[in-house]
Image (tube, grey):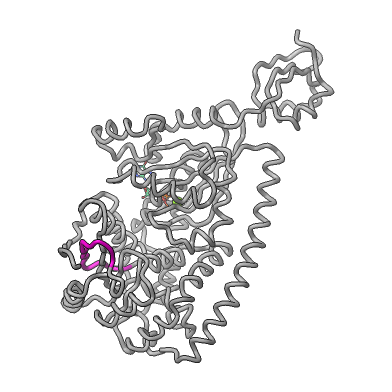
Amino acid sequence: MTGDGVRVTLDPMTTAQNRAVLAAAQDRAERAEGTPTPAPESLRPAPAGQWDEADDTTGSYDLEARGALRRVAGLSTELADVSEVEYRQLRLERVVLVGVWAEGTQADADRSLAELAALAETAGSEVLEAVSQRRDKPDAGTYVGSGKAAEIRDIVASTGADTVICDGELTPGQLNALEKILKVKVVDRTALILDIFAQHATSREGKAQVELAQMQYMLPRLRGWGESLSRQAGGRVAGGGGIGTRGPGETKIETDRRRIRSRVSKLRREIAGMATARATQRSGRDRNAVPSVAIAGYTNAGKSSLLNRLTGAGVLVENALFATLDPTVRRAQSPDGREYTLTDTVGFVRHLPHQLVDSFRSTLEEVAGADLLLHVVDGSDPDPLGQIDAVHVVLREIDAAAVPELIVVNKVDAMTEDDVLTLRQALPGAVWVSARTGEGIERLREIVAARLPHPDVEVEVLVPYDRGDLVARVHRDGEVLSEQHEEAGTRLSARVDGGLAAALEQFAAPVG
Ligand SMILES: Nc1nc2c(ncn2[C@@H]2O[C@H](COP(=O)(O)OP(=O)(O)OP(=O)(O)O)[C@@H](O)[C@H]2O)c(=O)[nH]1
Ligand SMILES: [Mg+2]
């Protein structure tokens, strides 16, 4: 059955986040419009004031570099390899969004499309229109019903869109059938998220992980893309001179398949190698019994901002989805002087493509292996509880559900008092902070310190003055209960872990 169609013109003022993402996208689009010859322009630094004000708590240098890279990367649509082409052409396209709304309220459906819009804009597209349809379930053949498809075809024609983005993961058959009707390229939410990851990956490991996910997405869809590409010859794909002209024939598809399969195995091997190196570093930290705290949460919740606020790390902060892909580990210190590590990680999203969860598994082990999880929630989002649920789904997938969790509601500066009151009832154990203003950060530091695993051996020692190194270690890794300077040395009463207790044994002193 075909239900009622709802045509939504996205109100860019719905949420502050959406507004800011829109502004950033418009900014990008304007800059791109003024650059008919992208190469020289892209090498010029962005004018001052274009980005968040430059300060080392926002990693603004990285942001600038990313903006420049993004445009240089646009040139790579000239690559002849179909497997490299398909993911690099979403940016700066003019898109129509299409959602099927099968469950939940109208508000849920609107939020889902608003998120799709934010994703599209993060990828560099310009959103012209958003349409959603109420149905029991997506149409098996064409995702939306056939009547709706015809309506969307008219919208595409009248707005001059060159791409339609569907809010789900579509089968190759659905993508194909829709392209036949709409006469423009159709991509799904999974491809869109993969595209953003591809644009944001910077490290060798991150790039390999994204490419692996892309290849796995690509493999079953190869034929579909081939057909659509050949039919689109001479189409309006932005910046893609020649992309549409290379429809691979049957043999080419077979060759591509083989090539992708062998690339997949190679990438798996590479990623496994890099994961081993990281595991070695991690076990080094474990041996020294440095407790580890992982920051996780929905994308754009303010995880990197919080890391910067707690450690002055200078990690990239951007009002864009999936700004962070690589884990950053920084040392932090509790108010009582103990050291621990804080790790910033990739953000999660509703229906995070399983290909990405799979290929980022080794990175996400940082979360699963942590002693404490700071689950950062954007309190100013319209649906913080929905975001928490989505994060829990991913945490279960990566076997991190058992890690002790501390919910940190961020962006309280952007919340109304009413919102705070409502959310407080739903989240009684949460800590309330603003990474931006610093509000609540000291309290957070104290709570984190209290939740760190406690060293469990109590010692009473008299350490001679020439072993100041040991005293320093007790301060750094243990918990000092009392300290006195006596003639023969420093008398310490402290709680430490087993390793340190063994090193201190020779200086054991009777309580006195
Ligand atoms: N109003 C307000 N905005 C904040 C706060 N913390 C972060 N932001 C903004 O939220 C946006 C996202 O911040 P990030 O720190 O990059 O968020 P993230 O969770 O690391 O995002 P991803 O790495 O993309 O998943 C940026 O525009 C920040 O300036 C806060 O306490 N208050
Ligand atoms: Mg981040």
Q: Position of residue 149 (x, y in %)?
A: 21, 74
Tell me if I can see residue 330 in this picture: yes
Q: Main secondary structure of the magenta part?
A: strand
Work out whether residue 198 or residue 226 is closer to the camera in this orientation and state it.
Answer: 226
Q: Residue at x 60, y 69 (%)?
A: 267
Tell me if I can see residue 45 in this picture: no
* For residue 446, side relative to residue 470 (left or right): left
Q: Position of residue 50 (x, y in %)?
A: 34, 58
Q: Position of residue 320 (x, y in %)?
A: 37, 56
The answer to whether residue 37 is above or below residue 333 is: below
The span shown in magenta is 125-138
* For residue 491, side relative to residue 182 (left or right): right
- Is residue 133 magenta-colored? yes
Work out whether residue 406 or residue 125 is closer to the camera in this orientation and state it.
Answer: 406
Q: Image quarter for residue 269?
A: bottom right
- Is residue 347 magenta-colored? no
